Amino acid sequence: MAKKTPNKNTINWPGAFQNVLMASINKGQLPVLLVGVILLVLIIKIPSQEAASIFYKTIDALEHYHILGWIFSFVLTLLWFFNSKRVRRVHANEMKRIAEEKTHLQSSAHGMKMPSSNKNKRKGG
């Protein structure tokens, strides 16, 4: 009988973790992921009565005393979001510029126009 080959498309927890990690690195969200993981570990390690007490004290403090912290957090999150978008756009433009320069250098080295490998490029343009 022939051996069954394992399905390489199955998702397991290390593969899922790797996908989340790579996506967060690509989108500039690794610090947020790390803070979330650290908070999750701290919550898991604290005894349940103490965790509930800390949670209620934190919510009470945020509701009554630290509205400025909420505003600062919201503004900081918005600034981070727009900065990440700007950085991705700058990076994409730089990659496009490098690709065009590489194509030009390859064409001049071969003495003929090289075909484009850009699948998104419109035909005739």
Image (tube, grey):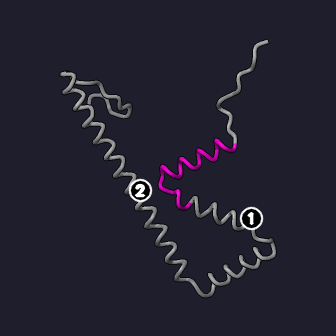
Identity of the amino acid at label 1? Ile
Identify the residue under disc 2.
85
Picture quadrant of residue 37: bottom right
Identity of the amino acid at label 2? Lys
- Magenta-drawn segment: 13-32
- CA gap, disc 2 to disc 1? 33 Å
Q: Residue furthest top?
A: 1
78 and 104: which is toward the camera: 104
Crowding at label 1, few (<14), some or many (≥20) Cα neighbours within 10 Å?
few
25 and 125: which is toward the camera: 25
Q: Earlier in the sequence, mark 2 or mark 1?
A: 1
Identify the residue under disc 1.
44
Mark 2 against mark 1, which lies toward the viewer?
Answer: 1
Question: Can residue 29 be found in the magenta stretch?
Answer: yes
Crowding at label 2, few (<14), some or many (≥20) Cα neighbours within 10 Å?
some
Q: Where is residue 51 in the image (x, y as percent from the top left)?
A: 75, 74
Residue at point 57% right, 84% down?
A: 66
Count of numbered tags: 2
Residue at point 64% right, 84% down?
A: 61
